[in-house]
Image (cartoon, grey):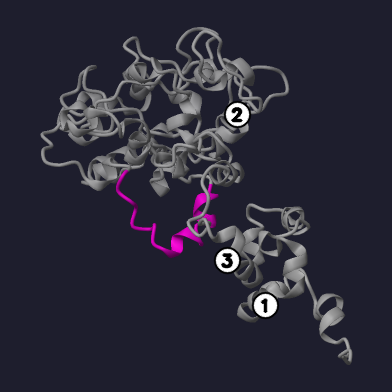
């Protein structure tokens, strides 16, 4: 089998497609079955943490390639320059089957020492400077997955079947759907600076709580930054965040005062689907909406304090009946059935004083808008009492 692998490796080296080479797929083709433990060995005796394969593991099959310096394509799979230990390429994202939604704390408990969600800070540790968060490894996962009955099960003698419970390297290489890298190019950002404001992780990473896969994650967009920084002078200074030479006025995406293109006149009436979506960004401009709220509550929180534009001073006394008759479903977005009955059981202001209104003052209003009368009255139970009486002779 070693000779077969060496032969296939020679075929690999003769190609010129280093960038599209799928290292796990290649080894699976050579060995007919991936044996993870051949390359990934424990970092220490009895440890659940596995090392990235080094020269010692590779030389078991690729000794000839190490002895021939004329094979740069082989070295390029792990090194970005001349073969040494300082130019290793970043590790490839091979963890794809992971759901944050399944791992989050249902009670959203916080760490008393930091004020952040405990489920976030338990898995994600930070570098000494607090700039970048680290992705959790086997050590963090083993806190739960080393317990009996928890699958996939992590131990120092992990098998290939258990590896496939979280890792699908061939699928990731074949579809090129890699997890988000966790860092924007040409942007300087410090988590520690934002932690001083006691911001919860979900304030910026709102999609995390409902994410079922690493492939559907993305870094926070500029709109999320504007939600807090729109009133700050720093947002007008490009060099505060950008490493490259960016100059000129800030684009519309950097200003919450600029209305998005989607906010047309019809958007006021037909924005329900967009506003109730899990990834809705209403909170970026509408400060009364919390980014941590579930989608179903975002509408309620906004409309409790922000009335629709149609609800003018005349709305309650003069206009709403016509709109309600045309589309009661829209009214039901905020109002319940008893909301109408509570109000309509009271005497309208136009009916006061009632004796005068009944004696004839209602005639002009009825002629102007008889349909409004029918909101509460019918001809049979009200109008007919007077208008069908026979004339009394003088």
> Taking 44 as reference, is 73 above or below it?
below
Looking at the rendering, which quadrant does residue 9 occupy? top left
Q: Is residue 315 left or right of residue 214?
A: right
Quarter of the N terminus within the rendering: top left
Count numbered badges in the picture: 3
Magenta-drawn stretch, dominant element (helix, strand or loop): loop
Q: CA distance from mark 3 to mark 1?
A: 15 Å
Q: In the image, residue 207 lies at what x, y percent? A: 49, 38
Disc ID at residue 357: none
> Taking 18 as reference, is 56 above or below it?
above
The residue that disc 3 covers is 319
Q: Which residues are magenta?
A: 257-277
The residue that disc 2 covers is 103
Say which element carries label 3: helix
Residue visible at 67% across and 58% down in the picture: 332
User: In the image shown, does 98 or 251 lie closer to the viewer?
Assistant: 251
Q: In the image, residue 138 lies at what x, y percent? A: 51, 19
Q: CA distance from mark 3 to mark 2?
A: 50 Å
Of the two numbered discs 3 and 2 on the same chain, state the one appearing first in sequence: 2
Say which element carries label 2: helix
Q: Is residue 384 left or right of residue 152?
A: right
The residue that disc 1 covers is 366
Q: CA distance from mark 2 to mark 1?
A: 63 Å
Say which element carries label 1: helix
Q: Are marks 2 and 1 in contact (CB under 8 Å)?
A: no
Q: In the image, residue 246 lies at what x, y percent? A: 13, 37
Of the two numbered discs 3 and 1 on the same chain, state the one appearing first in sequence: 3
> Taking 139 as reference, is 279 above or below it?
below
User: In the image shown, does 66 or 277 lie closer to the viewer?
Assistant: 277
Residue visible at 55% across and 13% down in the picture: 111
């Amino acid at each position: 089998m070693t000779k077969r692998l060496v032969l296939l490796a020679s075929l690999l080296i003769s190609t010129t497609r280093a960038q599209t080479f799928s290292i796990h797929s290649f080894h699976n083709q050579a060995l007919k079955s991936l044996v993870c433990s051949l390359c990934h060995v424990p970092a220490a005796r009895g440890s659940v943490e596995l090392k990235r394969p080094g020269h010692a593991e590779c030389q078991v099959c690729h000794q000839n390639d190490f002895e021939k310096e004329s094979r740069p394509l082989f070295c390029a799979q792990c090194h970005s320059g001349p073969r040494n230990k300082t130019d290793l390429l970043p590790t490839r994202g091979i963890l794809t089957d992971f759901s944050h939604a399944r791992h989050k704390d249902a009670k959203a408990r916080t760490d008393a020492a930091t004020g952040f969600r405990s489920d976030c800070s338990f898995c994600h540790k930070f570098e000494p400077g607090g700039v970048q968060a680290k992705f959790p490894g086997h050590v963090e996962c083993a806190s739960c997955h080393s317990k009996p009955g928890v699958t996939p099960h992590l131990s120092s003698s992990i098998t290939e079947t258990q590896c496939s419970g979280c890792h699908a390297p061939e699928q990731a290489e074949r579809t090129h759907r890699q997890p988000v890298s966790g860092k924007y190019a040409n942007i300087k950002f410090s988590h520690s600076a934002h932690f001083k404001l006691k911001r919860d992780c979900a304030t910026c990473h709102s999609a995390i709580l409902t994410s079922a896969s690493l492939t559907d994650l993305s870094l926070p967009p500029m709109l999320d930054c504007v939600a807090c920084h729109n009133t700050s002078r720093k947002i007008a200074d490009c060099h505060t965040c950008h490493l490259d030479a960016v100059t000129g006025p800030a684009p519309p995406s950097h200003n919450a005062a600029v209305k998005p293109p989607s906010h047309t006149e019809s958007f006021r009436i037909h924005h329900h689907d967009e506003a109730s979506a899990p990834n809705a960004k209403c909170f970026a401009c509408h400060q009364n909406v919390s980014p941590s709220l579930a989608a179903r509550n975002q509408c309620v929180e906004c409309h409790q304090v922000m009335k629709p534009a149609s609800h003018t001073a005349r709305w309650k006394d003069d206009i709403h009946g016509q709109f309600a008759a045309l589309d009661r479903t829209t009214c039901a977005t905020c109002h319940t059935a008893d909301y109408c009955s509570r109000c309509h059981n009271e005497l309208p202001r136009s009916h006061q004083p009632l004796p005068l209104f009944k004696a004839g003052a209602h005639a002009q209003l009825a002629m102007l808008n008889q349909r409004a009368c029918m909101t509460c009255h019918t001809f049979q139970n009200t109008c007919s009492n007077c208008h069908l009486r026979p004339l009394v002779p003088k």
